Amino acid sequence: MVLFVGNLISIKNVFLTFALFTNRYFGGLRLLQATCKKFYQYCSEQGIALAKRNFTLKYDTNIPRQVGLAGSSAIVTATLRCLMEFFNLNELDLEKPIQPRFILNVEKDELFINAGLQDRVIQVYEGLVYMDFHKDFIEKQGYGNYIHLSVDHMPKLWLAYVTDPSDSGKIHSNVRQRWNQGDKEVVAAMKEFGDYTDQARDALEKMDITRLADIMNKNFDLRRKIYGDAALGESNLRMIEIARQSGSAVKFPGSGGAVIGLCLDEQHKDDLKKAFQAEGFVFCDIIPYPES
């Protein structure tokens, strides 16, 4: 992700333009302008004076589109960083723990994108992060408990995704509605997902890769039970099937369109890659990115 800040258009003008034409933006442009609007609003509310300087925003991304890999929020996160640097703001002006919420609000409030905090947290914090979104943390401090783990504990993971994706947001089905209604099955499942997170952290810290692989498989099995095959889609299920036939642990890394896996036997990685590519899926290794 690369953004360039130069000089051309004032942030106030961006705010006014976005307010007038909020429903006419498509693709990455709307993400840039929505971020500028929220940034201007935030600074105004916090009494932060912005210098009267002009700038240009451009973006480039290599994140595959619409496969649940948080490409939209990555653009918003990068834009926020550029704006903060350009106007000489730091974490005293916009604290790091609340930046993910700011990014989420850009997408939800301005662009009506259905999303959660997890992707925004990792984009802000980078590296390997344990996230605890317990209600007590949210109510007390307004954000979750975010703890960096060593990327040295990460095993070699792989990623596969579809080349002809549909909108990843469709994967959410009616689970959110059921959650809001207090559906016992969904509430119990979300608690179980949280338990898997704690177990995965423990497995990572102990370098217990076999246990981690088991947790990944359980994670997907529970997701399939709650969402149902119709919501998950044929392509997603096929990727899971290919991985499991090759003996690899596998789960969703996002809302759909991609799967992430762990080979317990690295010697089978080439065969797994060929199996995915034979059916038109993209396959690549994941290279950990440490916190900056």
Image (cartoon, helix red, strand yellow):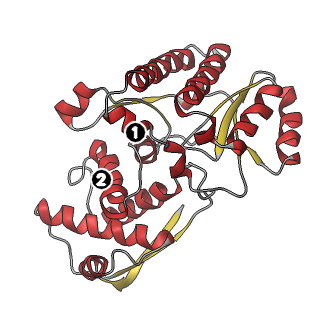
Q: Which residue is identified by label 1?
A: 176
Q: Nearer the viewer, residue 249 or 207?
A: 249
Instruction: Using the image, determine if residue 181 lies above or below residue 100.
Output: above
Residue 149 screen position, x and y as percent = 47, 28
* Residue type indicated by callout 2: Phe
The answer to whether residue 93 is left or right of residue 96 is left
Question: In which quadrant of the rendered view does residue 145 lie?
Answer: top left
Give whichever of discs 1 and 2 has the lower sequence position.
Answer: 2
Residue 209 screen position, x and y as percent = 66, 18
* Residue type indicated by callout 1: Arg
Q: Which residue is identified by label 2?
A: 102
Residue 15 screen position, x and y as percent = 26, 76
The answer to whether residue 18 is left or right of residue 237 is left
- Would residue 285 be seen by someone viewing this image from the given angle? no
Spatial separation of the CA atoms under disc 1 and disc 2: 21 Å
Residue at left offset 51%, top offset 51%: 169
